[in-house]
Amino acid sequence: MTSEATSTDLHAFTEQWLDWYRGQEARLAAPHGFLAITGLHWLDDRPQRFPDAPGAWHTGPDGVVVTLDDGDELVVGGTPVRGEHRFGVLPERGGVDAIWKDAVIEVAKRGGHDIVRPRHPDAPLLKAFTGTPAYAPDPHWAVTGRYVPFDEPRPTTVGAAVEGLEHVYDAPGRIEFELDGRPLSLTAFPGHVPGGLSVLFTDATSGVTTYAANRSLSVGAPGSDGTVVLDFNRATNLPCAYTDLATCPLPPAENRLPVSIEAGQKIPRERGGA
């Protein structure tokens, strides 16, 4: 390959990474994104009121219920509701966004518990957001690996950013790869697109230049021979890297890589990163 071709390829690689990075930052800076969260409220069978959401909230065998005060209104699925509204039983890791004035009231289930998590566009964390530090993109960290499916998905329990909370994922397989000649592997969870995969990991940079608890990497659907690309340049922080009002999962023990992955997003400025 000529130096001109190499330069052209590197330029294209960098531009593609910049497009991805800008998209990540735009989602973080959205008026109702994770930086807009103002409270993490755990529901039980007692009606509770919160300073950043309307009405009184409780949950039980039939799911989440809110009783709104006179004059209060939520918009759920495009329909205005008043008085008592029943959200029903929510699926694990599922949720409903209800609109209240200029805010969004997230009603969700995490780790088997129903929560209310309001998001306000004037949240101090969001207003102060100036972007996420990241390593410069480098093709060295885009590694080809092989996906090895398990005979059956393995239920995998992991911890969470919230003490005492656990998440359970069905891991469909693992990804085997080499980095600088060292054989490594990562347990994979289902991804956010059909056929795709997601991995949670830490490495030797965790707690030094990258967020200590976890990072996440999306992986495209494996090829017919199991080939996948792990582009660690696109390793992202989870919401818990920015806010204590998140319930993010931690990596399984086997995904604590004994190498330094000097790629992807670094410790957020909100956590003292530079």
Image: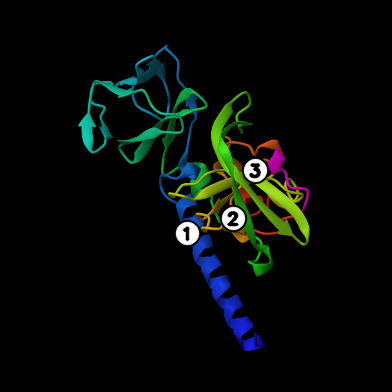
Mark 1 neighbour class, 10 Å CA radius: few under 14, some 14 to 19, many 20 or more: few
Q: Which SS class for mark 3?
A: loop
Q: Which residue matches tag 2?
A: 132
Label 1 or label 3, whichever lies nearer to me, is 3
Q: Is 121 left, or right, of 98 in this rendering?
A: right
Res. 94 visible in picture: yes
Q: Nearer the viewer, mark 2 or mark 1?
A: 1
Q: Which residue is mark 1?
A: 23
Name the secondary structure under disc 2.
loop
Instruction: Measuring from the top left, give residue 164's x and y in whole percent.
Output: 62, 23
Outermost residue toward the top in this view? 46
Quarter assignment of residue 86:
top left
**Residue topped by disc 3:** 214
Q: Earlier in the sequence, mark 3 or mark 2?
A: 2
User: Mark 3: which amino acid?
Assistant: Asn
Quick one: label 1 or label 3, which is nearer the N terminus?
Answer: 1
Which residues make up the magenta segment? 254-259
The amino acid on which the numbered mark 2 sits, given as a three-letter code, is Thr
| First in residue order: circle 2 vs circle 1 | 1
Per the model, the C-alpha gap separating discs 1 and 3 is 20 Å
How far apart, in angstroms, are the residues tagged by discs 3 and 2? 15 Å
